[in-house]
Structures are given as structure tokens and as C-alpha cells.
């Protein structure tokens, strides 16, 4: 008898609990799932080119997209001489459209292009679906000379 009552109590409690839980789940919005991305690593390597060697910049930049969709940009340029603030690092579609960058890294670099750099682009702030096929570009600009392209490197995927 006692066992039966406690069993009934148990089911009543369970029913109430289920009801309370499901109704509260209905009224409070469910936590939205975090965005998920495939982990990818893109990179661009500035290599020695033929032509005017005094205008060339060498270095490498990697773009690691984590599964939480944050893109971590790390890079280093080895041959940037003179005032770092005269240089920009951008992603462009082509040299012909160098003045309309897909993305500039001015905030990330803070004029420190002669030092190793790292920045995280948060999910949603990344204005590109895929970097692959676009160009990394380092440009020189000092007020007198406008946007001289010191080097380009195509973005590839590992
Ligand atoms: C992630 O990779 C899978 C398998 O290659 C693919 O089917 C899917 O579309 C990719 N998802 C995104 C968001 O790129
Ligand atoms: C190479 O570029 C530098 C800097 O812009 C310029 O002064 C020089 O005349 C150029 N040399 C050649 C061979 O084009
Ligand atoms: C930059 O500095 C390096 C090492 O001092 C030198 O070899 C190179 O010619 C310089 N490049 C320019 C464009 O001045
Ligand atoms: C980039 O180009 C400018 C203009 O031609 C030149 O003065 C500068 O030395 C170049 N920088 C490098 C690192 O080659
Ligand atoms: C995304 O994942 C990376 C690597 O695990 C981590 O360093 C970064 O803080 C994460 N970003 C966010 C916004 O959670």
C-alpha cells in the first residue's frame, strides 16, 4: 500500500515536473545554437618575383577559420623597410580593383606591418565566404606616392 502511494506520488511529481519544464521551455526562448563553420586554413605567401626588386615585399599570412567561425589572421612581412605606417595590407579581388579592398586590416595592424601580427575576426564580421582566389596585397602610400603595389600573393587553401 505504502509502495503504491509513493509510486503514485512519483508519477504525479514527474507529471508536474514535465509540465512545468515543457511550459517553461515553451515560454523562454531556446538559446540559439552558436554558428558552426568548417575548420579551414588559408594562406598567402609573398614570394620573390621578377621585376623591380626594390618594390618587393616578402612574407606570409595565414587565415585560420575555427569551428566557431572566428577567423584568426596571423602574419609577418620580412622586407618592409622604412616607416611601417606607410604600408597597408589588404585583401583585393584583383590589382585593377586595388582601391576597393574586400577587407583591410588597418585596425588589426595598427601601422605595425614590420612586426608579426595576429588578429581575430569574429563570426559575422568576416565579409567573405571564401578567401581562396582573392589576392593579398601590400601597398605603399605616403601622401606623395599613392597606393604603389609592393607585392601580391594569391590566397590558397591548405
Ligand atoms: C562543411 O564541409 C562539408 C563536407 O565537406 C560540406 O558538405 C559543408 O557544406 C561545409 N559547410 C560549410 C558551412 O562550408
Ligand atoms: C624601381 O622602383 C623604385 C621605387 O619606386 C624606382 O625608384 C626605380 O626607378 C625602379 N626601378 C626600375 C628599374 O624600374
Ligand atoms: C630592406 O632591408 C634589407 C635588409 O636591411 C635590404 O636587404 C633590402 O634591400 C631593403 N629593401 C628596401 C626596399 O630598401
Ligand atoms: C614599396 O614601394 C615603394 C614605392 O615604389 C618603395 O619606396 C618601397 O621601398 C617599397 N617597399 C618594399 C618593402 O619593397
Ligand atoms: C573561437 O575558437 C578559438 C579557438 O578555439 C578561440 O580562441 C576563440 O576565442 C573562439 N572565439 C569565440 C568568440 O568564442
Image: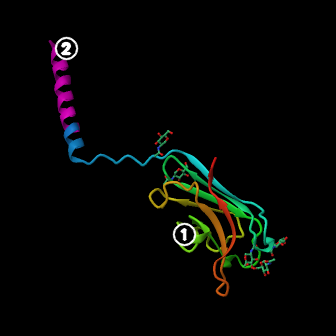
**Residue drawn where x is 15% and y is 18% of the image:** 5
**Residue drawn where x is 53% and y is 72% of the image:** 100
For disc 2, the neighbor class at 10 Å (few under 14, some 14 to 19, many from 20) is few
Q: How many tags in the picture?
A: 2
For disc 1, the neighbor class at 10 Å (few under 14, some 14 to 19, many from 20) is some
In this rendering, which labeled residue sits more in front, label 1 or label 2? Answer: 1
**Residue drawn where x is 75% and y is 60% of the image:** 47
* 49 in relation to 12, above or below: below
Q: Is residue 28 left or right of residue 133?
A: left
What range of the chain is rendered magenta? Answer: 1-21
For residue 3, the mark is 2
Instruction: Name the residue nearer the viewer: 136 or 32.
Output: 136
Q: Is residue 12 left or right of residue 29?
A: left
Q: Is residue 120 magenta?
A: no
Q: Earlier in the sequence, mark 1 or mark 2?
A: 2
Position of the N terminus by quadrant: top left
For residue 115, the mark is none
Query: Mark 1 and mark 2: span between their CA atoms?
Result: 75 Å
Give the percent coordinates (x, y) of residue 73: 60, 58
For residue 101, the mark is 1
Q: Based on the displayed image, in which of its 4 quarters is residue 13 positioned?
A: top left
Q: Based on the displayed image, in which of its 4 quarters is residue 120 positioned?
A: bottom right
- Disc 1 is placed on an element classified as loop
Q: Is residue 15 left or right of residue 97?
A: left
Q: Is residue 17 magenta?
A: yes
Q: Is mark 2 within 8 Å of ligand 5?
A: no
Amino acid at each position: 500500500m505504502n509502495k503504491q502511494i509513493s509510486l503514485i506520488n512519483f508519477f504525479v511529481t514527474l507529471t508536474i515536473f514535465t509540465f512545468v519544464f515543457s511550459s517553461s521551455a515553451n515560454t523562454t526562448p531556446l538559446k540559439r545554437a552558436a554558428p558552426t563553420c568548417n575548420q579551414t586554413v588559408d594562406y598567402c605567401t609573398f614570394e620573390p618575383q621578377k621585376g623591380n626588386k626594390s618594390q618587393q615585399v616578402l612574407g606570409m599570412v595565414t587565415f585560420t577559420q575555427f569551428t566557431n567561425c572566428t577567423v584568426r589572421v596571423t602574419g609577418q612581412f620580412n622586407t618592409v623597410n622604412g616607416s611601417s605606417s606607410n604600408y597597408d595590407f589588404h585583401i583585393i579581388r584583383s590589382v585593377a580593383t586595388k582601391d576597393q579592398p574586400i577587407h583591410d586590416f588597418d585596425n588589426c595592424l595598427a601601422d605595425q606591418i614590420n612586426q608579426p601580427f595576429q588578429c581575430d575576426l569574429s563570426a559575422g564580421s568576416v565579409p567573405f565566404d571564401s578567401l581562396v582566389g582573392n589576392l593579398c596585397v601590400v601597398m605603399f602610400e605616403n601622401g606623395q606616392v599613392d597606393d604603389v603595389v609592393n607585392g601580391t600573393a594569391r590566397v590558397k587553401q591548405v
